[in-house]
Image: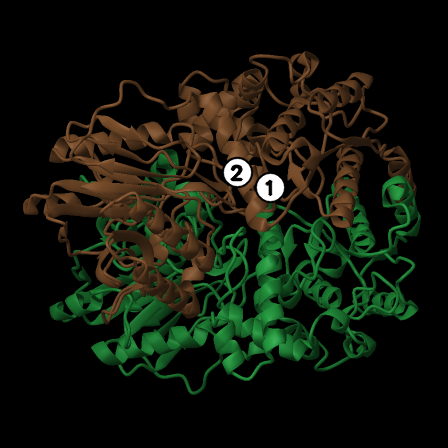
Chain colours: A green, B brown
Amino acid sequence: MKIALAQLNYHVGNIEYNTQKIIAAIEDAKNQKAEIVVFAELALCGYPPLDLLEFEEFISNCENAILTIARACNNITAIVGAPSRNNKKFGKALYNSAFVLSNGKIIEIYHKALLPNYDVFDEFRYFEPSVNFQCLNINQTKIALTICEDLWNIGENPMYPFSPMDVLIKEQPQLIINIAASPFSDTHHQERLKILKENSLKYQLPIAYVNHCGTQTELIFDGGSLILNSNGEVCEQLPFFDEEIRIIDTENLIPLNKSNIPYKAELLYKAIVSGIKDYFQKMNFKQAILGLSGGVDSALVLVLATEALGAENVKAILLPSQFSSDHSINDAKQLAENLNCPYEIIPITAAYKSVEESLQPYFKNLPFNIAEENIQSRLRGLLLMALSNKFGYILLNTSNKSELAVGYGTLYGDMAGGLSVIGDLYKTEVYELCQYINREKEIIPKNILLKAPSAELRPNQKDSDSLPEYDILDQILKLYIEEKLGPEKIIAKGFDVATTNRIIQLVNIAEYKRKQFCPILRVSDKAFGLGRRIPIVAKYF
Amino acid sequence: MKIALAQLNYHVGNIEYNTQKIIAAIEDAKNQKAEIVVFAELALCGYPPLDLLEFEEFISNCENAILTIARACNNITAIVGAPSRNNKKFGKALYNSAFVLSNGKIIEIYHKALLPNYDVFDEFRYFEPSVNFQCLNINQTKIALTICEDLWNIGENPMYPFSPMDVLIKEQPQLIINIAASPFSDTHHQERLKILKENSLKYQLPIAYVNHCGTQTELIFDGGSLILNSNGEVCEQLPFFDEEIRIIDTENLIPLNKSNIPYKAELLYKAIVSGIKDYFQKMNFKQAILGLSGGVDSALVLVLATEALGAENVKAILLPSQFSSDHSINDAKQLAENLNCPYEIIPITAAYKSVEESLQPYFKNLPFNIAEENIQSRLRGLLLMALSNKFGYILLNTSNKSELAVGYGTLYGDMAGGLSVIGDLYKTEVYELCQYINREKEIIPKNILLKAPSAELRPNQKDSDSLPEYDILDQILKLYIEEKLGPEKIIAKGFDVATTNRIIQLVNIAEYKRKQFCPILRVSDKAFGLGRRIPIVAKYF
């Protein structure tokens, strides 16, 4: 059968926009003689709709939109992900459903059975799991229609007591369709392919898999929709991060010669660029601003932002203090010039002096410490926000995951911003991505990559004065944050006892700071933000 | 049988502290000849432990602590809430359990069946629901042991397909024990009593109910543990917000003459004071600082903070600009004096001028607008944070729920702070609480309560210049936020179309600000923060 995989970038909550996009894709698929066109999980409302699902009016709007889409379905069947109501006397109010639309009508509604509720997922908050399963018949083809997690209960320690496919397979379907909302991480596409292959091999069936692309605040969807044949071989692979509607004849599946999946650095680069672009487009913003320090983090953010928004739409601001080194200013200028990016220099020295004088009656002769360091950082935040408010720029945050982890940043200072661009990249990954950017020519001045990291908030300060070297730090952080190993287990791996305990304490103490941080573009399996929930007043480890 | 209800204030994550507290209570109960002592849900690890549960080492620590507690159980049986492992091949890794400890050993482990996953609750993220139910026998008494939500599936539209009590009742138990972690809201204690009464009447059984007291970051637990007889009458009522271990003879239950539940304003007052106190104690902080503007919000926060921490531990800072009115300064001073609270006056005019000059080359002759207003607010935030950093004060935030809702506040300015004290009180409730505080004598100067609210960021500014009157605003906000009505339904209730739509747009646009806000002491059924999850880039309504 001719099937259209519609890999689209929806706008969460924006039912009208998504409806128009879905109808346009149906027309397109129809023109290309597809018998069936498949859209992603919760395509209609975007993913994740979160508590918008708790508004009765929002659900009514979804229901009306589904009827509008159904009216566009003539001579084609569409499968559209959307919420539907649970009309039983008990249970959650909604199902996470796949609507089957044909001949101007809703002909079937299938419900998701396995509801992920870990990491960034909260589906059990809204949805009742399905317990009834039946195949779908379209033009003499029997299809096992599943929704994302429904295929994931495979392997040695399944999270759920049963797998819908184990019921559906009894009807001897010819094809599995899986509509998904599967967010990007730097390894997740591999995991996803593995799971799909396992299903294909276990049930000896081809699988058509349709994912979202585009970013919803922090969640980046990488697309990568595909078709496997019944031997688990990839026969069609849609692009990463971009929209496409591809028509495929399931009778004629030919394995691809080689994988066209990009490598890690390229994936990260594309993911983050897509994340910035969509944040601005969906929020209806145009121009960004950021503080350019001459360090590696803001350098990377500037490159990514100019790629996403165009150099003319990114304003770099150098905010030197008396502690800023000449090379920092020169390196920052050089980078802005390499990128053709407008920049300004606004020294903070005068404002700093004035604040110092206002506080002199209270600070008296107390020694210079973190208070004065933070004043500089917060004055920078204040000036950047003033420019943001005056001219409508959106402030991009430049903190990396290592410093967010240990609290090496100033709340309302360098932790300010509307979007964290590299907050899910450890410092070592920041360098890797810079190397990738410089792979053909020196876009980021070499000096930025070679010098020792420093916040330059006091004379001759170095990050390594107060933190272990980043290659050690990042290893401990990954074990603690990603692998969820406690101090005993980390120490057992050979890390220094005092260093390990100190790093873990720093991570724990910084929860209150991260609570007030902006959304972070998520590119790992465990980012700070909605996927990691730690109580603030807690004492542990 | 003689039962001890142990209503205690745990420290989330702090297994060692909680273990000591539990063991001390067991000793106490034993000395008072109790046969059984009952602790709250997840007492061992505190509630909510959130993702700490995902650390294998944390669970091992819990297991060791349970064995330590068991060793203290001689001549008494203890029921202690704690996580336990799911050893089945499938499902989530843990159960939310009640350990029955006696003769130095674990004699039974009961698991929670109904796992709340709405509002602030995320239990399905961690726990597998129980499907097997059996009564517990202690000293010839047959007990139906249930955990919080297990009793809540009662009424017309149950959320879950079955109720554990409907199974347990077949064994003809003589008593229901319910161990809970039921957070405070201004109406929740009534709802809780109603549910418990319904259970008692339905099953014709007495119920011993044990709740937490104390605050874990934003979640305030009000205690209010109680015993109902089999006619649903309250026979024992433990205090609100305070710890107590009470010994009760279940053979001799006498209904109380009258309710000793405080009224709303008193409850709110006690709840918030408890919230501040616990935040400081559990974070090991001592002194607070806040900006005192002469307005009603900061006045209320100052009163609550001095009650919680002692006037000598709260520093009020007046930060006047050229737009501050004389009466604001005088009212603020008068309040601080009424409370015997130390205060300082730090004008922001000089620092403001200096920032203005730094920006002059860019702002040129553009008219004064929100940018300049926010500079003032952010300078105040910066100065308060500088004092906080220098002297170790914790900055208390003074924003109310109405302004947080519509985004009437400056990120990194008046939205700064470690804890939001009144962020779950609408402006009209702020006034109600002030009236309560002034019920006997004028603590808050009358002028603060009488004058029109103003941010004083430009000449003659009034809140009502840009917002509807607060009594209208708060009604619309409640319908939208608490009742989750969409614009159509709110307008259908008779509110102005343009006003309603404008307010809803303001609420929606401000999601990005609230994302970066500090934890809010939760006193309503729907507070901003972890119980309300709205996507930021979304477009809706």
* Above or below, comparing residue B23 to residue A428 in the picture: above
Q: At numbered mark 1, what does the secondary structure look like: helix, strand or loop?
A: strand
| Residue for point 43% across, 16% down | B494
Q: Nearer the viewer, residue B185 or A14?
A: B185
Q: How far apart are labels 1 and 2 at the CA level?
A: 10 Å
Residue wearing tag 1? B419
* Above or below, comparing residue B448 to residue A469 in the picture: above
Q: Chain of mark 2?
A: B
Residue A509: x and y in percent read: 60, 58
Residue A79: x and y in percent read: 30, 56
Task: Return the disc, 1 or 2, that comes first in the chain's sequence.
Answer: 2
Residue A425 visible from this viewpoint: no
Q: Amino acid at mark 1?
A: Leu
Neighbour tally class for label 2: few under 14, some 14-19, many 20 plus, Cα within 10 Å: many
Q: Amino acid at mark 2?
A: Gly
The answer to which image quadrant residue B404 occupies is top right
Residue A418: x and y in percent read: 65, 50
Residue A464 visible from this viewpoint: yes
Q: Chain of mark 1?
A: B
